Image: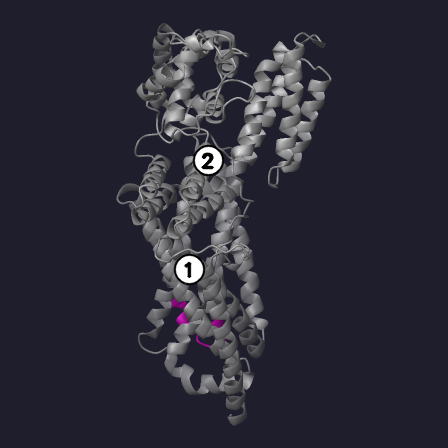
């Protein structure tokens, strides 16, 4: 009976993960290139008009900046989009050299800047709505002496400066400046000017300053009108679903959509009240950012344990709840965030320098900004919903299908058709339980991220351990004579009494796991719209699965018994190695196992291979056990066949 159960447990299978993208580099060089692009997009108009140079000094600066942009982008680490960035930077440099029209240069610079941020993420917004009172205090202490109390560049320290400080109250320039652009200048300073970098200030202070100086060109009366528009016009609110949308939008861009007067009013309001566009305080990604900030604070204070606990909470409580929705929209981004979260915990665990942990948190905030944009409310079209629903159900369905087909094939080879009804009853009950789980999770309870990771981790390790035993046992029975001996001596007793109900339980448990995952992803897709496309995708996947089931069952009937066990033993061995790797990774994400990243191991999720020392060692140990077990089983099987 024990060996029969081992064989039936072979049905736990792994999922097909999304491809992994290259890691983004440290953002500083990319940020400098972005700042130069932002500067070119605004100031080039003062250098060239009608194909002629109107300000030689300004034009010389533009050509210099264009060369720096190309050089800096070319020096960035390789990513999938780097070649296009380098090409576009060279094209921008050529346009400036040819004295192209300012509007064309500005549009090209803005397009390149947006592509640069997509390829090399940088934090696009503060983790929380900034403290504008703090921003005002910092401005009066450190900025007003040059830029003036009211932002008109008339402070005492402005006398004799060349170039003169920026007048934040200047309307035309303010129209072209985003809060993000202001933040970048505050963060990095301006070469060749008296504007120094304020990178020594905490990021939250720099954001507070950026929002504060960004309001000088807009009046209180405009802010009052902006509040009225914000509260009365859903379309305007929809245009700013996150703080990142507020920080990236220039008044000029907004004016092209809603008109100059409304754009000035809305800008005046949001730069005085950024909390209006902030996600709800209970939002998952907001919680993730909160925990990351708290973790960094604890690490700076020397409390590594508290920092590690908070970093784990950032993942389990803040990010993990949005994984299904993000996976449905951008699976590659999901994997990048997971990898970055693991890297942060590893850095904290080994006591890395504070600067390294700060860089990890900054990168995570940038990735969370990208995730927030991917998750921003939008109406999904039917094509996207079809593709998502089809792919997810086919992936999860194939896993469950392999489970059921393996059990049915085994029972047919054993000539025990009366037990099939228990297998069918198990998977049908699993589908019904999946529906009940969806209803409960939607209306009654919340399923924690830790529970999901622990279930996946322990389930995968248990399945991997069982599959090691099953694979070794099946390899020993790959000789037809050995199998016939086993049938004659033991199988007649294996399915008696309560054993058939264990078939029901096994079918239920392994299929329910796949149903549960499918429900999570389908709920995320349904919430995005495109319902007809989603239903069509689901029905199409069901049709494909039906064809695959028929083909597998037909083939299993024709397969000789010795060949069946030989191929199955190899499959079990491979699956066991994969599953133990995935199990260790899940427990690392749940914080139950330490993480020690290794540079020499690739990340190949379809093989359960992750670049951590713990995962690789467990997989190598599993391979060793399989090799020894297969050798011993071969000898035992040959002896049994000879004796029979």
Name the foreground residue: 8 vs 73: 73
Q: What is the distance, in whole Å, between disc 1 and disc 2 at their CAs?
A: 28 Å
Which mark is drawn over residue 583?
1
User: Residue beneath label 2, please?
Assistant: 366
Within-10-Å neighbours for mark 2: few <14, some 14–19, many 20+: many
Above or below: residue 397 compared with residue 207: below
Name the foreground residue: 141 vs 535: 141
| For marks 1 and 2 on the same chain, the one whose residue lies earlier in the sequence | 2
Q: Are marks 1 and 2 in contact (CB under 8 Å)?
A: no
Q: Position of residue 511 (x, y in %)?
A: 41, 59
Q: Quadrant of residue 618?
A: bottom left
Residue at figure coordinates x 30%, y 50% from the top left: 305
Q: Position of residue 630 (x, y in %)?
A: 52, 78
* Residue range of the region highlighted in magenta in the rendering: 409-423
As drawn, the residue found furthest toward the front would be: 160
- Disc 2, SS: helix
Name the foreground residue: 279 vs 182: 182
């Amino acid at each position: 009976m024990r060996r029969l159960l081992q064989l039936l447990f072979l049905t736990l299978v792994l999922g097909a993960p999304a491809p992994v993208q290259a890691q983004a580099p440290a953002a500083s060089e990319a940020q400098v290139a972005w700042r130069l692009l932002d500067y070119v997009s605004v100031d080039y108009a003062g250098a060239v008009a009608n194909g002629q140079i109107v300000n030689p000094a300004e034009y010389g600066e533009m050509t210099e900046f264009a060369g720096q942009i190309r050089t800096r982008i070319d020096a960035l680490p390789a990513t999938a989009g780097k070649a296009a960035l380098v090409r576009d930077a060279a094209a921008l440099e050529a346009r400036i050299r040819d004295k192209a029209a300012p509007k064309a240069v500005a549009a090209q610079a803005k397009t390149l800047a947006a592509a640069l941020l997509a390829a090399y993420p940088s934090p696009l917004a503060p983790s929380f709505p900034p403290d504008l009172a703090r921003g005002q205090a910092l401005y009066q202490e450190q900025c007003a002496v040059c830029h003036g109390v009211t932002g008109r560049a008339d402070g005492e320290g402005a006398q004799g400066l060349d170039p003169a400080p920026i007048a934040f109250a200047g309307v035309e320039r303010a129209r072209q400046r985003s809060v993000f652009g202001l933040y970048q200048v505050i963060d990095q300073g301006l070469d060749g000017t008296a504007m120094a970098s304020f990178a020594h200030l905490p990021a939250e202070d720099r954001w507070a300053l950026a929002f504060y100086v960004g309001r000088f060109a807009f009046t209180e009366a405009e802010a009052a009108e902006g509040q009225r528009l914000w509260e009365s016009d859903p379309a305007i609110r929809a245009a700013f679903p996150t703080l990142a949308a507020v920080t990236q939008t220039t008044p000029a861009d907004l004016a092209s959509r809603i008109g100059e007067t409304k754009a000035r009013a809305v800008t005046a309001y949001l730069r005085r009240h950024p909390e209006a566009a902030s996600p709800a305080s209970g939002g998952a990604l907001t919680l993730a950012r909160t925990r990351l900030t708290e973790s960094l604070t604890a690490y700076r204070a020397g409390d590594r344990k508290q920092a590690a606990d908070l970093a784990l909470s950032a993942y389990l409580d803040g990010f993990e709840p949005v994984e299904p929705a993000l996976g449905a929209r951008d699976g590659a981004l999901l994997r990048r965030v997971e990898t970055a979260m693991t890297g942060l915990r590893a850095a904290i665990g080994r006591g890395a320098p504070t600067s390294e942990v700060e860089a990890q948190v900054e990168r995570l905030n940038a990735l969370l900004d990208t995730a927030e944009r991917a998750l921003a409310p939008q109406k999904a079209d039917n094509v996207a919903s079809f593709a998502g629903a089809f792919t997810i159900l086919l992936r999860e369905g194939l896993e469950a299908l392999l489970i059921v087909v393996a059990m049915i094939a085994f029972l047919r080879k054993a000539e025990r058709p009366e037990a099939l009804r228990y297998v069918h009853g198990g998977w049908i009950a699993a589908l019904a339980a999946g529906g009940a789980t969806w209803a409960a999770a939607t209306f009654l309870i919340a399923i924690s991220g830790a529970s999901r990771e622990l279930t996946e981790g322990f389930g995968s390790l248990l399945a991997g351990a069982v599959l090691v035993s099953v694979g070794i046992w099946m390899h020993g029975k790959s000789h037809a004579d050995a199998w016939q001996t086993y049938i004659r001596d033991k199988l007649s007793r294996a399915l008696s009494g309560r054993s058939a109900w264990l078939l029901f339980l096994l079918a239920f448990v392994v299929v329910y796991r796949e149903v549960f995952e499918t429900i999570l992803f389908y709920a995320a897709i349904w919430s995005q719209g495109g319902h007809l496309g989603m239903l069509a995708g689901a029905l199409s996947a069901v049709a494909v699965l039906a064809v695959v089931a028929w083909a597998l069952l037909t083939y299993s009937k024709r397969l000789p018994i010795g060949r069946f066990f030989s191929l199955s033993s190899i499959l079990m061995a491979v699956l066991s190695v994969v599953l133990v790797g995935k199990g260790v990774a899940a427990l690392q994400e749940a914080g139950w196992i330490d993480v020690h990243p290794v540079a020499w191991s690739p990340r190949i999720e379809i093989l359960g291979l992750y670049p951590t020392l713990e995962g690789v060692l467990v997989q190598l140990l599993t391979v060793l056990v399989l090799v020894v077990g297969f050798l011993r089983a071969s000898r035992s099987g040959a002896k049994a066949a000879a004796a029979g």
